[in-house]
Amino acid sequence: MGSLNEIAIAAGINISSALGFLLAFAILRIQPINDRVYFPKWYLKGTRSSPRHIGAGFSKFVNADLSTYLRFLNWMPAALQMPEPELIEHAGLDAAVYVRIYLLGLKIFVPIALLAFIVLVPVNWSSGTLEHEKDLNYDEIDKLSISNLGKGSKRFWIHIGMAYVFTFWTFYVLFHEYKVITTMRLRFLANQSRRPDQFTVLVRNVPPDPDETVSEHVEHFFAVNHRDHYLSHQIVYNANALAGLVEKKKGLKNWLVYYENQHAHNPAKKPTMKTGLWGLWGRKVDAIEYYKAEIEELCKQVLEDVERQKVMSDPNAIMPAAFVSFKSQWGAAVCAQTQQTSNPTVWLTQWAPEPRDVYWPNLAIPFVELSVRRLIISVALFFLTFFFMIPIAFVQSLANLDEIERLLPFLKPIIERNSLKSVIQGFLPGIALKIFLILLPMFLMTMSKMEGHISISGLDRRTASTYFMFLFVNVFLGSVITGTAFQQLDSFIHQPANKIPETVGESIPMKATFFITYVMVDGWAGIAAEVLRLKPLVMFHIKNTFLVRTEQDRQQAMDPGSLDFGTTEPRIQLYFLLGLVYAVVTPILLPFIIVFFSLAYLVFRHQIINVYNQQYESGALFWPDVQTRLIAALIVSQILLLGLLSTQEAEKSTVALLPLPVLTIWFHYVCKGRFEPAYVKFPLQEAMVKDTLQRANDPTLSLREYLKDAYVHPVFQKDDMYELVTMDEEKNPTVATKRQSRMNTPVESKFNSSVGTDEGEFSRMHPA
Amino acid sequence: MGSLNEIAIAAGINISSALGFLLAFAILRIQPINDRVYFPKWYLKGTRSSPRHIGAGFSKFVNADLSTYLRFLNWMPAALQMPEPELIEHAGLDAAVYVRIYLLGLKIFVPIALLAFIVLVPVNWSSGTLEHEKDLNYDEIDKLSISNLGKGSKRFWIHIGMAYVFTFWTFYVLFHEYKVITTMRLRFLANQSRRPDQFTVLVRNVPPDPDETVSEHVEHFFAVNHRDHYLSHQIVYNANALAGLVEKKKGLKNWLVYYENQHAHNPAKKPTMKTGLWGLWGRKVDAIEYYKAEIEELCKQVLEDVERQKVMSDPNAIMPAAFVSFKSQWGAAVCAQTQQTSNPTVWLTQWAPEPRDVYWPNLAIPFVELSVRRLIISVALFFLTFFFMIPIAFVQSLANLDEIERLLPFLKPIIERNSLKSVIQGFLPGIALKIFLILLPMFLMTMSKMEGHISISGLDRRTASTYFMFLFVNVFLGSVITGTAFQQLDSFIHQPANKIPETVGESIPMKATFFITYVMVDGWAGIAAEVLRLKPLVMFHIKNTFLVRTEQDRQQAMDPGSLDFGTTEPRIQLYFLLGLVYAVVTPILLPFIIVFFSLAYLVFRHQIINVYNQQYESGALFWPDVQTRLIAALIVSQILLLGLLSTQEAEKSTVALLPLPVLTIWFHYVCKGRFEPAYVKFPLQEAMVKDTLQRANDPTLSLREYLKDAYVHPVFQKDDMYELVTMDEEKNPTVATKRQSRMNTPVESKFNSSVGTDEGEFSRMHPA
């Protein structure tokens, strides 16, 4: 365990590195050239135009106004100024609720820290057991922790009492927060203007019918079983191949632009390229001509593909799923919440996600395949969590150079060079693990996709929960009981059930210093690095140099990014877990966590205001997950405290603490019953009110027209496959600033007749 | 462990006692005097009239036709003859599906037993490890069990393979059975003629409204939010006090009838009684006069109570719950499956149970109270299951006579009598435990009631699951590892997780003899005693002697009873558990279980055809519970096998068997997803079909009139409050034989205006 001194030094280092990041950010953000990196959200909203238009010459790129350097920290109060309703309006409910998680951390831990420092720290300090045992190595920090109480001390009762106080305070804050966020969600849903997903239900697993097409089958089924409410439907096309082509075309276009730019800079020299692998081999050709021809070819292919789907000669192109729209929200709410047929594996209905939230490739997975996938992925996740060290160790063993030489003798002369040898042997093992950890969220996301969730928000939520599991086992437990997760699992299986919390609980106080350092390195510095946006900064300038010609190109080179719920939320949960575990044991950890939550709240509020552009809006659908993980952290902390105290010869503590986890589980079910339905179901009363209001406000609206192309695969919606042809028509850059709203509302598609289908259009479906 | 000889002796004893019961039954059932005890179902259906009318004199009471004695076993084939559709028609789906549980046992265990005897028994027998170790005590039965394989034997792979085969066979049978029963349920619901519960939804937690009565509030809410479908509603009166009065009156009437009968037998002597406690003290009065006056007084009280509720001056009389009826089944299906308001703790809707299935006292429990009750009952159930021995031991310690003498010295002379002393000391401890075990299902039922379930079928299901938990812990585990449940819990907590299945698994083979005996005593003899109906037989003859005057009285003295799902189903599950656990380990147990299932199938089929009259019809709503417990038994059997093999130095067996529980859990979720919705939700397609059919078949029906009094508290429906006045009008005994249908369909109530409420009746609610 570290002394207070050591911690102070570590804190000093981390504070200065964090301050360094913040300073760099403060200077970089006021340079006009970086404006689109640090304020993309405002560009997307169309309320900010490039400051480079204003200045001239040098000041176009570098800020020369010295007074702004003096106010370099004024982004901090600015980030706090925007009131919450405006924030929801500006960044969406998901983002606004996300930053409230950090606020929740402050709400829970500030009072707990105060109470702990008033009550527990003096009690621990004044016990002085460690002072009397001269042969023990102890540090100042231990004198502030529960370790300073001798075995069997009566003072443990104070800790038990505080555990109850902290738990009830956490209950209170959690219940209140759940209530507030549920209210926010309901108000948000009620205030929203008309959106296609309010009227639409996603139907999956449409059973095959020998006599009817999928579209006819859907039509007939809902026209019969929701007689008074059914309006229209859109069937789902398998556009995955098409999406691949479009993606490929985008890459080709980038190269075309690159060469065109080169040509423009140096008109004398025609740019050339080789057609082989990575431009290294093959025939030399005129690059511009080559890419133009390639793109044209691809466009033809895309058009053919679209044509083929249009006449629907290919039955594989139609998925057994459809978006069914209703005349009223009441009708949609009813259909989404009820079972349609006696076989619950077909005609599965659920609320349609927002159009931009749909994860299209997963819409067509049959019921049985879905359950097989779940089984396989669950087993895979178990192995990933507990045995991930095995492949890593294998890769690390490959880094053993003698082994490499034996296997691949021709590499010997290269490897034998001294400098390379030391690099490989010094870094490779560490790098393998680091790369794995960086790629881990991506693996988990891929696994979530394979599990078959149908919305992007659902994928994010699932990834978050698996990632939290991984962090809990490998970071939290792995740090407390040193050893790999597999060794832990093995020792857990071979230990009595009551020994496990004891083993873990006993080593908890000893790890306080480690976790304090962890909070500073991973938390403080991580958050400061977040605000600097190093990667988007570099990427923007590369793109800006090579690919940008028009204002619109620059718009596209801008990468606002979005809150990555699946990766960041589990990390916050880890801090909650640490705070709750150490609140009673070593309260000195709490201030570090409070600093983290404050800083993170500030930074993320700034980011969602100025930078991030959310991919989708789920209406805080993730909150039940957040709450569940907090409850789990609370239970873990209680069980570990119980284990710790039972090793301290405070026998009655077991009996005194046992009601805590029982109460916590009960509290969980109360909250679940009270609030969760607001995230799963849509109350009919609200739907009726909204229907009535909308009928009164807009009696002439043709809902059928409005919903016609709302749920069309984005490939069919994106105009950019025709950009090559139509690029010059689209001169006005403000069109692009409407990007968000364009993603929100359906745009006129060029394939109406192929994808928008309603009663009247059946006859037109198979043109002669 | 017992030898084969010992088992043969035990089997002989049990077979003869079971045969004795069956013989007694065969003789008693053909005596005319017992006809109403053994064939009450047919009386209730109105298709059988007392055989005593036919014969004369002696033959009225005793069967003198000797030829019938020769055919005394012909009830057995008769029980099997009724085809299943007719059985459903006759006894209801619940009963028909219940006997299928026994059939399921045969389907699972007969093939498993065959395979085990062909493969496993020879493998075990020929191993001969036990023969070589001369110092071991072993029995023939051990040579047939897995114990005969030596440690580390390669033959364990055969057992592992068979474990897979048995598991997959069980999967197949379970899946098939779930499918069949789901189809039966859906067909049953579809074929049923119109029933009030098909159109009705139970609404609970109606929020208080300052301006409106509960009835007005319900009316307005549903008229707005289910505009096109709402028909009418019935509010729920708190008739618990009234029900108490009615119950009390019934008791008084029994005494009146008793004294009147006495008077009739002996007209010279007026019967007298004392008014004090139990008729032992007090003033001597004319008994008939006294009871007549008492009953009249009570009737007045009842009428007053009814009157008070009628004018609704007492707000406590109205519960915040209502039965809301809809114009179509589609409307009811929608309302039952959806959430009504944004606050999920008010306006809770669910399908209304059948009128006779409603458990009225629980309809008005608020949401928060409900979750507190659940918490308390869960904790109480935990303590009951694991610590029930503490109060029992306390009672047993009281049976220590020296202690009693010390505390209550004045009892000394009584206790010192030798005969009494030995009786108390010999029997009291055992009797205390026996009484507890007999009363246990009643305790569990009371706890379920306190938990707040609102239907009698729900109470039965809940009781069954808690009772199974108790049997599993205290009978199964308690027999395998000898010791009280608390000691087991203690040792489980202090053992490593992998040691628990080892400890239990290791002692499994040694307990085979015990469980074989258990199956014979509890199973075989229990079933044979079931068919004899000793208690109803005695009760009927007592009532018949003292209380019966009219044919209608005799009808009421008859106690058909009903299937007691909460008590009997968990016991069947115990046999499933034993069968699955011992299938691989000691297959010799299987034939005993197969005999049990065959006998039970026969007896219960006979009982539901001839005896039981179901209290309610839930449409096999209990099947998901049955399936879940079977899956749990399968997992327990797999884990115990794993534990057993890992003590036999068959290390790889752990790895080879681990996929089994994972697969089983997965299978559980597949079945749940595939079939359970049919028991929870009501598909809209089915509702639409039924609506269309009913509109076509009966276009003139006034649904409002039909549903008017369907959901009226039974106290208001039962005419017997007025029987005293109207008894003589009701001479025709066939009226009473319609009892079942009277419970099924709403009868004309005398309180229409107070309880039937629809739009038009608001003005009539508060008469001037």
Image (tube, coloured by chain):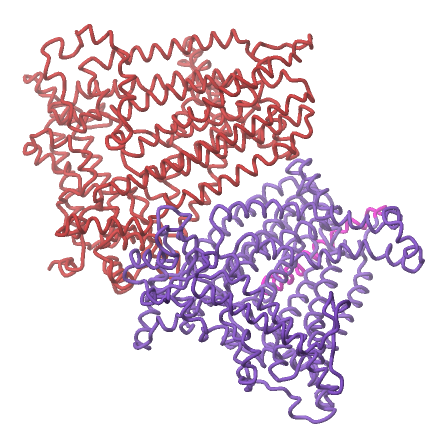
Chain colours: A red, B purple
The reply, left or right, for residue A330 in relation to residue A395 is: left
Please tell me whether residue B47 is drawn above or below residue B703 in the rendered image.
below
Majority secondary structure of magenta residues = helix
Say whether residue B8 is visible: yes
Q: Quadrant of residue A660?
A: top right
Please tell me whether residue B325 is drawn above or below residue B632 in the rendered image.
below
- Closer to the camera in the image, B239 or A137: B239
Residue A328 lies, in percent from the top left, at: 24, 53
Q: Quadrant of residue B569?
A: bottom right
Where, quadrant-wise, is the N terminus of chain A in this rendering?
top right
- Closer to the camera in the image, A313 or B252: B252
Q: Does the magenta-highlighted stretch encompass residue B36?
A: no
Residue A659 lies, in percent from the top left, at: 59, 36
Please tell me whether residue A528 is drawn above or below residue A199 in the rendered image.
above
Write the start and end of the magenta stretch as one range: B107-136
Q: Does the magenta-highlighted stretch encompass residue B132?
A: yes
Residue B95 lies, in percent from the top left, at: 55, 69
Report the label total.
0
Where, quadrant-wise, is the C terminus of chain A in this rendering?
bottom left
Residue A386 lies, in percent from the top left, at: 52, 32
Q: Quadrant of residue B542?
A: bottom right
